[in-house]
Image: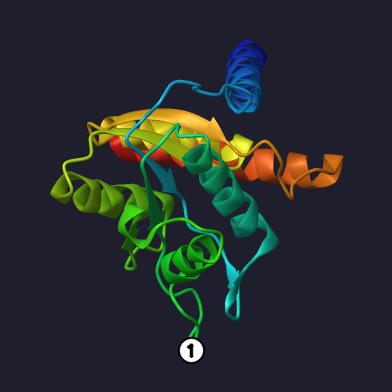
Amino acid sequence: MTKSQKRWLILILLAFISALSLAIASTAISIYLYGNQTYTAKAEAAIVLGAAVWGEEPSPVFRERINHAINLYQNQQINKIIFTGGVGEPNEAAEAIIGKNYALARQVKLNDILTETESRTTYQNLKNARSVAYNSKLNKFLIVSDPLHMKRAVLMARNLDMDAYPSPTPTTRYSSFRSQIEFLIRETFFYFVYLVLQI
């Protein structure tokens, strides 16, 4: 390989790395900004994306999501709450059941709660929730999760032909700079993975 060819190869490589870095940075920024959007109009149901449970209690992350859904319910922005999530660890209750029990203890009516208890991923949360919702003739949804989770979750929901809108938790356990950066890096990675898998 001549010096000229090596120089061109290096320039092409640098251009590729620069383009990739720009794509990653712009996507991360869009994920962060999207998490600040909230759909304020009414929907038929909130879909609460599952998160870890601690014994018979929701983890702090899951609790924030549940509390937000309950607040939407109490403010009559939604009529139903759909809890999602299967069993994370052996001998634990399904995430959706823990969410349901937590909501019942806070005066959400049993008839206004739906659950799916098989999912393990965000995509499964949404796909299974869609089946539960459509069986109950529900068609318009607020997706409830942490702000940085919103862009990927709503994209997935809309790709499932759901009339879905973001409703990020106003409070989040990912409040420190370090935890937000770690979550943002993770979400950016999984966002790209999802885009690739959809091609």
Q: Position of residue 135 (x, y in %)?
A: 14, 50
**Side of 194 where 5 appears, left or right:** right
Q: Between residues 40 and 36, which one lies in front from this camera angle?
A: 40
- Which residue is at 48% across, 89% downward? 91
| Amino acid marked by disc 1 | Asn
Q: Position of residue 186 (x, y in %)?
A: 62, 45
> Could you tell me if residue 185 is visible in this image?
yes
Element at badge 1? loop
- Name the outermost residue toward the bottom: 91
- Which residue is at 69% across, 60% downward? 60
Q: Quadrant of the C terminus?
A: top left
Location of residue 45 (image quadrant): top left
Q: Position of residue 65 (x, y in %)?
A: 58, 49
- Which residue is at 57% across, 79% downward? 56
- Which residue is at 30% across, 51% downward? 129
Pointer 1 residue: 91
Q: Quadrant of the N terminus?
A: top right
